[in-house]
Amino acid sequence: MTLIGARLQIIRGITCLVLSGFIATAASSAPSAKTDVGYDITVRIDPASRRIEGRSLITVSAAGELTLVLGRRFEVTHALVDGLPMGRSISGTVNTQAWRIPRRQHGQRRIEIHWRGELAPMDSSLEHRQTLGRTEPASGSAGTFLPDSSGWYPHLVGTLPRYRVSLELPSGQRGLVAGRLIDESETTEGYRASFEFPFPSEGIDLMAGPYAIGTDTMRGAGGKPIQIRTYFHPQIGDLAKKYREEVKGYIEFYETWIGEYPFTEFSVVSSPTPTGFGMPTLTYLGIEVLRLPFIRATSLGHEVLHNWWGNGVYPDYAHGNWSEGLTTFMADYAYKEREGSEAAREMRVGWLRDFSALASGQDMPLTKFTSRTHGASQIVGYNKAAMVFLMMRDLLGQETFDRALQLFWHEQRFRVASWTDLQRAFETVSGRDLRVFFRQWLTRSGAPVVRIAEAARTYSDSGHRVSITLEQSEPTYQLRVPIGLRTEVGEEVRMLDLEQKRQTFTLEVPARPIEVTLDPGLRLFRQLMPQEAPPILRQIMVDETVVSVLLPETGEAYAAAELLATKLQNRSPRIISATNALPTVSVLVIGLHDQIDAWLARRQLPVRPGVVQGKGSAQAWTVSRPGGAAVTLVSARDVTALTALARPLPHYGRQSYVVFEGAKMIERGIWPMRMQVMKID
């Protein structure tokens, strides 16, 4: 499921939030596709009463013992295993009930189970972050969403079933699950539709609502017909045609790049809540998200691509989810490359700045990343992983890189695949041993710190000789370090292979050298030096050690400040007194204009910067502290202006400063980045 800004952070998040229902429930272990399992489900839902009734027929060819699981909010009314009563449940979890299916030596097993229950009310007031990882099955007149992780249907643990789902809804409601639409009808008695997913699946998510359905058909690779559908709420029906056209373009783009689209349809489905999820054959996006003008050019393509990576080849979650990083690289980053080199560089800058915003111990090895649960996990699992693929492409070249991905797709379609399988594909096509590259970037947390220690020049027979000494932190990496070399006649980039903690390189240049720059294009994943990474608002959003100073002491202003601190940090803030000595960790300070100005003066910190001075009803900006972590200040004209920041401000984490008029952002920016540049004497 991908989300916005998660890829806004509601806006920039949606491209980033692709999670699947399966990820939320079983990210710790990869299911087995070896057991042949089929589900035949009939489900009836009444959104008005929030009642659900279902019948499942499960067929399975497996000799061993199996475990059947269903959400605790559902009641089993009838259950048979091979014609005999299923027996009593065993201990499950807080949210699930379970049954043991005994061992059988041979033959196909048949499990029939009927269930019913009441769904939770659909809460359209939820914010984007509140919907991430939410596992309640919810329904209402505005929409129904039953994520796989809610246990809304009986399923066998540790299997990848094929399925058929028949859905029954009242008149005026329409719904779907991932898969091929087999039949569909609507009468005064209600709506009926059947879907089939003939491949091993990670789970079943169900969506319904008062949708108007639009349909187009395109021809995919080899002439295969692909049905493009929109299931949109009436208030955004005018957008449906544009979305279907964009989907066609993305499918054509990725079929050329990777290989044939693996399914026979793709649907864009609207949600009454600000969600952003990707499942096989569809994406489920909030109504307000779909209205955003840039979504069709960014997040939509990300979701389409997940039908190859994530929903067409399944990540081996036990050894790391590679699909989010690869999708980010081939969607979000690829679109920036199409805009131009500066747009692509700015995205790389953002990735590195975000990583530098993490406090010590907040990151993880890529082999430990399963799904996005908070900002820190996105920075690693999406951004760092995407940059690993960028470095791989820089190392092997575009043609070899693409052929390796095409081989990976050809070999792993509808299989569980790991980083090791990706490594094998790259090694097979390139003919190179890539063990060190993958080991250092996947199994280590953190990132190397690289600096130019010395640079000097001498004369040589060919013109000039430049001596450059590089240093890196321990443990050492094997790095291809780009070095920008400016001479009297121009600029060029040389690649230096740094393998030791300190290493000196000698370069011959015809013209007199003037200066050298470390990694001028920011194509190497590394920990930025303090001067390279000016503070951004995200630091107080992802840093779990941050403390908050709330300058209003009582009343509505204090309540508004506390709510804003909670929203920014997505947890209860650690509040310290305004008179306390500043700790060495990041600090968030919230108050009214006069309170902020007085606090800055007492602390002898820089005054309100001119770029925000006197603008809007509220401002937020960051300040660097010598020898300490950054301070983020949020200053508002009055209580109303402070209250208005709670919803929009958390979406501007990549900014160093932002100005609001009410809840509307009117100005933003990032403090200048200072590259590592050394003049050559």
Image (cartoon, rainbow, N blue to C red):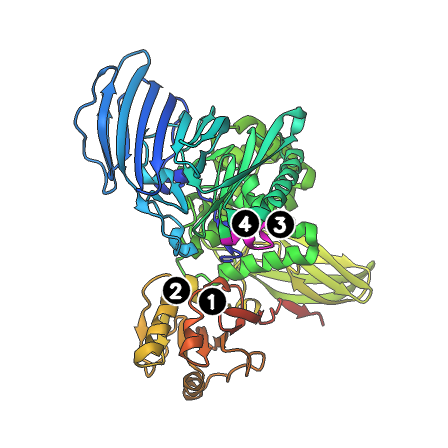
| Above or below for 564 versus 143 | below
Taking the magenta stretch, the answer to whether it contains residue 92 is: no
Q: Disc 1 or disc 4, which is closer to the eye?
A: 4
At x 66% / y 61%, what residue is drawn? 520
Q: Report the front residue among 369 and 250.
A: 250
Residue 304: x percent and y percent? Answer: 56, 40
Q: Amino acid at mark 4?
A: Ile
Residue bearing mark 3: 297
Residue bearing mark 2: 567
Residue 351: x percent and y percent? Answer: 55, 57
Q: What is the spatial separation of the Cα atoms under label 3 and label 2, in whole angstroms?
A: 28 Å
Residue bearing mark 4: 236
At x 36% / y 52%, what residue is drawn? 123
Residue 61: x percent and y percent? Answer: 35, 17
Residue bearing mark 1: 649
Q: What is the spatial separation of the Cα atoms under label 1 and label 2, in whole angstroms?
A: 9 Å
Quarter occupied by residue 219: top right
Q: Amino acid at mark 3?
A: Ala
Dominant SS of magenta comes to helix
Q: What is the spatial separation of the Cα atoms under label 4 and label 3, in whole angstroms?
A: 17 Å
At x 37% / y 24%, what residue is drawn? 39
- Asked if the residues shown at circle 4 and circle 3 are in contact, with their CB atoms under 8 angstroms apart, the answer is no
Q: What is the spatial separation of the Cα atoms under label 4 and label 2, in whole angstroms?
A: 29 Å
Crowding near pointer 2: few (<14 within 10 Å), some, many (20+)?
A: many
| Above or below for 57 versus 282 | above
Q: Amino acid at mark 1?
A: Leu
Q: In terms of secondary structure, where does tag 4 sit?
A: helix
